[in-house]
Amino acid sequence: MRRPSAPVPAGADPALAGEYPSAGDEVVSICRDLLRMDTSNYGDNSGPGERQAAEYVAGLLSDVQIEPEVFESEPGRTSVVARFPGTDSSRPALLVHGHLDVVPAQKEDWRIDPFSGEIADDCLWGRGAVDMKDMDAIILATVRQMRREGRKPPRDIVLAFMADEEAGGVKGSSWLVDNHAGLFEGVDEAVSEVGGFSVELQGRRTYLLQSAEKGIAWVRLTARGRAGHGSQVNGDNAVTHLAEAVARIGAYRWPTVIPATVRAFFEGVREQTGVSLLAGEEVDVEKLREMFGTTARWLEATVQNTANPTVLDAGYKHNVIPGQASALIDCRYLPGQRDELMRTLTELAGDRVTVEVLHGDVALEAGFEGGLVDAMRQSLLELDPGAAVLPYCLSGGTDNKAFSRLGIRGYGFAPLKLPADLDFAGMFHSIDERVPLESLRFGVRTFDRFLQLA
């Protein structure tokens, strides 16, 4: 990884002496390398796994004498964990984590090959550019520069790069918590993805820090009926039972619920703009969309539970009525709302359809105060004076869910200063995923300052 650039400052570890690229340059090359590694997670263990990317990450850490440990929950499902000692190891440590897997991408749907790591329009393109190989690269470039310059964070940093987040973390973060909890001994706080990105709010750049996230219930509906010939009258058709249940669930309008984090977000918007997005306990959705553009897709989902049908499976021949039909529903619930979601879902499914949770995980709400939040806010405002910072709730989920079982309080902080016209929210799990080069460089500068303050 050595390339000629500015010399290492005095005081750096002599073993790391030499000339290296700056973190601002290296973040681009690291992210590009990661994007070229296909780590697609299909959710059924059929993908390539994370081994190649994990070995690459382990090499980058070893190169600056941060010794990694490599773990496999199953062959090819690989995670990397390392500890970067701080100046005061008696303090509780900070966990900084990312995932190495990505959702699949179909090349023919993209303007640019999703695994080419191509640079075009001052952006780096590829599956994982925003979810979340950009953040992996920011973390790695930052700690490599700190080590070369002989700088330590104020407390120990546990670095973790994990498998399987895109399928719920069963073979990654959850497996590590269950089997190697000692790796995270002494850790009390964590930061990871989907927070610290900017939006334009009435002409003022505003960074959204993720301090809460919805819970997950990935559900299978199963309808059973009388199998038979497709030409017969059949009032007990499993496909019909299932279709009716799916239609009821898909069309249901979930009631508004406003968690503390979301209420704080709305209050911050009102204080900053003078515009109230709340009318009593209801949200003015049209105004929300007008103010936040595509980011409103996330924000709308943080004031209600959701249940979206995603997969249907029934039958095997045109003239055969099957005896069973099933559907998959992606359910996300707000803090404190799991029981209400499951009760409503069961009612909507009806008596002829069973409801089975295939994977579930908790909702989180960490609060928006304390030293770590102050460090995130200060690092952003030092690098972008005049901006604003608000809390928000993530409508999806992160590996912070698994680490919460160890009592670790997690936030989303992947700092990116973004162009106002970039459809950032719309690129997650979508086509033409890309991250601006300058946003990556801003991320390194901000994350370096954050680690000094944290």
Image (tube, helix red, strand yellow):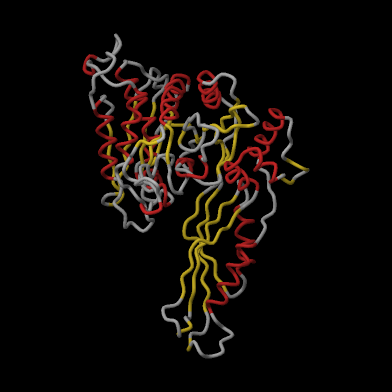
Residue 451 placed where, x, y %? 43, 23
Q: Which residue is most to the bottom?
A: 232
**Position of the N terminus by quadrant:** top left
Residue 171 placed where, x, y %? 36, 50
Residue 15 placed where, x, y %? 21, 17
Rendered position, 138 above or below 344: above
In the rendered structure, the answer to whether residue 271 lies left or right of residue 232 reads right
Q: Residue at x 27, y 31 (%)?
A: 60
In the foreground, 147 or 308: 308
Rendered position, 102 above or below 438: below
In the foreground, 259 or 362: 259
Q: Residue at x 22, y 14 (%)?
A: 14
Rendered position, 318 above or below 79: below
Residue 196 placed where, x, y %? 52, 31
Q: Which residue is most to the right?
A: 280
In the rendered structure, the answer to whether residue 341 lies left or right of residue 419 reads right
**How many numbered marks have been drawn onto this rendered protein structure?**
0
Rendered position, 397 above or below 184: below
In the foreground, 346 or 434: 434
Q: Residue at x 50, y 54 (%)?
A: 360
Q: Residue at x 68, y 38 (%)?
A: 263
In the rendered structure, the answer to whether residue 317 lies left or right of residue 375 reads left
